[in-house]
Each structure stands twice: as structure tokens, then as C-alpha cells.
Image (cartoon, rainbow, N blue to C red):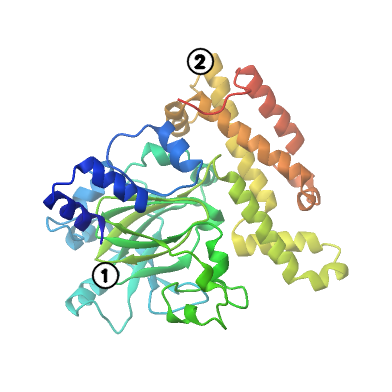
Amino acid sequence: MDREAYRNCCSLIKVPRQSYEQFWSSHFVDYIDRELSYSKFFKKYLLPNHPCMFSRRFTEDWKCRKQWVSEEGKPDFQKLLQEFDETPVPVANCNAKEYNANPKQVMSFKDFIHYWKEYIQNGHSSPKGCLYLKDWHMSRDLPEHNVYTTPVFFSSDWLNEYWDTLEVDDYRFVYMGPKGSWTPFHADVFRSYSWSANICGRKKWLLYPPGQEEFLRDTHGNLPYDVTSAELRDRGLFPHSEEACQPLEIIQEAGEIIFVPSGWHHQVYNLEDTISINHNWLNGCNVDIMWQFLQNELSSVQKEIDEWRNTMDSWHQHCQVIMKACSGINYAEFASFLKIIADNRMAFLNACSTGDTSDYPRHLSDTLTTLGPYHAAFDLQRVAHIIECLLCNEDFKRLDHSTLTLQPETMLQQIRETIQSTRGQHLLYQE
């Protein structure tokens, strides 16, 4: 039973609203339908790494919910075509498998909408397969389309702050897909958080808490492509699958926003023709999870090419190159990432102490001002902790530190001096 049906049943038998919401939250996933302070979200969901769902009231003022959706609650193809027409977009084929994902092609938005209309007219089927517009960097490619606002709960976003500073990439995406389109089993990039808002349509999410995915590996150590596949019952192929818990199954309605915590593997289905906005993001609460992920990635690379260790003087450097190619980041770039985050927060705290924010970037100033100096101090403490971890890591020690933008000992000292000078040395974030 989805939440709407459950809510209707409770209404029929006159169950008080507070009672059925408490039951739903304790048995399924917390549902947030009223004002919530950032501090409470921070303590109840970010730090404990716990999922939740925000009601449609948090997106009701978004332009895309008014401009992209018809009166019937369906994608408004005509208005969408007026906005995007010949724009090139990435499209995946959900009926094809390439490694553990779907192969992608680039096509014009107009051609995708033409396909989508035909797909609906043919009873949601097509000889072209089930095509899904996904991972479209609309915000990056078309910054003038200001059609939604990132909720404050997800605004402490180091990942996009870093890429925005470099002006080369971002992790903000638009997804558009017909009924039946889906995303195979995975965890998000760098083990980041994600949030996903349905502009229209409904999704079904299957989520596994961190660690449960280990029971789902096959005899070769590979994760399944589809966790609903009958082959998972084959003990010869998936020897530990029966030990895994049942996934948390969530139905996401139009307008609602789901918060997916770090390292929660998941699989997602569009139950109707659906449009969604998705961000990957991370911050001081889960940067340690990212650091552990990077260590695991490097370890996997080292095991793969271990037989050449003694034949190459630059073996460790090659491991970093391969890691970057496979994961999108290596230790040197991670250090650069930490430096930019730390520099921004030290500049903010110093500006707060002097009262002069004129030279501080406006978009960062707005975010950090909203969250406040306590939060900036918390961020710096988390960066300092990770830098201390880097200094103890043998693989990081092997890097040529003269080529790094981050000189760890110097940065650590600067962070400590900033926190002390702004009298926030022992402050953790609170409200």
C-alpha cells in the first residue's frame, strides 16, 4: 500500500492525522509535512545518515511544477518543447545493459519528446526500447532556466560548490522518463547524499542501508544489476542473498522530495510518466564516508595491478591515474577539493569577524550566512579531521606534495588559527 492509499484508509475510519503519520514514520520512512528547522534536519537525518521524505508543500512554488506540468498532472510536452526544442540531451536505453548500467546516446530534446509521445500512444512500448532522459546538466548548460530552488536542508553542498568554483561540471540533474523507465541498482557518486524531487509522476524506490549490499554480491564480488531478478535466489551465484534485509520500499508522489543518505544502494522505477530534479551532494557530515570510499577505490586498483608493483618505479602514480579514470577523482583532486571548501569557510569567518563581506562571492555568502558561523566552524573542523587522516595515510604520503594545491600541514595550521581567532575553536553546529 502506498502512502496515499494508506492515508485515505485512515481518513475513512477516522484515524487522527497525527496517529497515522506516526505509524507511517515508524514503519516506513519519516514524512515531513510541516516546517522543520535546518538544525533538526541536521541532527535527525544528516548526521545519522537516515532517509526521509518531504511533502509536496516544499516544491509548490517551483516554476517547473507550474510550467512543465499539465492540468492533468502529466508532463506538458508543448511547453517543454517551447523551452528546450533542439537542446541536446543524454538518453539511456533501459532495455539494454552495458556493464551494470544502461548505454546512453545524445539526441535532441525534440526527438526525445517525439519518441515519448509515440511510446505513450503505443501502450508504453516501442521497438526502440524504453528510453530515459537522465543525468541532464540543465542547470549548468542552461543557467537562465531558473525553475527551482534548492531547499535549505540540502544547501550545504560541498560537491557542487567545488565544481562551480572550477566552472567545469556539476552534479545537478534533470530526469524525464516514461512509465516503466528505471535505474539499476547502485550507490551514488563518491557515496554522496542525493535528493530527488518529482516535478510530476510517481516513483518507486528500493533502498538498502549501508553494508547490506555486501550480502547481494555474486561469487565474483559483483553487485546485481537488478535486485528484483529471480537469479538472486540462485545460491550458487549469489550465496549470501538470503542474508540481506528486505529493502525499504518507498512510493514517491508528485511534488515530493526524497533524501537518500550516503552509501544507501538503491534501485528506482518510474510508475508513471515522470519528471524529476536530482542533486548529488556532500558536506561535513559525510565527507568521512567519501574519504573511506576513496581509500577502498584505491585499494581495489592496487589489487588489480599488484603483479606489476615491483616492475614499475611509478606504480603508485599509475594507481592514482587509474583511480581517477575509474572513479572521477584521486587523492590529489580530493586534496584540492578540501582546500577550496576550507578557503571559502575561512574567508567567510574572517569576513564575519571584520564585518566586511564585500569581496566574498555572493552565492556562497548567501548560503553560509543562512547556515551561520557555527556551521562554517563545524565544516572547518571536519576538513581538519580529514586532513589529519590524509597526513597519516601512506598512499597520500607518497604523492608529490609540491604539485598539490593543498599543503596539508599549512592548511591545518590556517584552519586552527581561523577557528581560534573567530572564537569558535570548540563549537559544533547548533541552533
Viewed as shown, does residue 48 lie left or right of 419? Answer: left
Of tags 1 and 2, which is closer to the observer? 1
Task: State which quadrant residue 135 falls in.
Answer: bottom left
Viewed as shown, does residue 346 lie left or right of 357? Answer: right
Is 233 above or below relative to 318? Answer: below
In the rendered image, the residue lying farthest to the top is 354
- Label 1, label 2: how many angstroms apart (C-alpha)? 53 Å
Please name the residue that numbered disc 1 is placed on.
179
Q: Within 10 angstroms of label 1, few (less than 14), some, or many (20 or more) residues?
A: many
Measured from the top left, where is residue 403 in percent x and y? 75, 46
Quadrant in which the C terminus appears: top left
Residue under the image location 46 percent in, 37 percent down: 42
- Inspect this view and state whether residue 107 appears: no
Viewed as shown, does residue 157 lie left or right of 328? Answer: left
Viewed as shown, does residue 306 lie left or right of 224? Answer: right
- Inspect this view and state whether residue 416 appears: yes
Please name the residue that numbered disc 2 is placed on.
355
Name the residue type under label 1: Lys
Residue under the image location 51 percent in, 66 percent down: 244
Measured from the top left, where is residue 379 in percent x and y? 57, 34
| First reached walking from the N terminus: tag 1 or tag 2 | 1
Name the residue type under label 2: Gly
Measured from the top left, where is residue 170 in percent x and y? 48, 51
Viewer-nearest residue: 16 or 234: 16
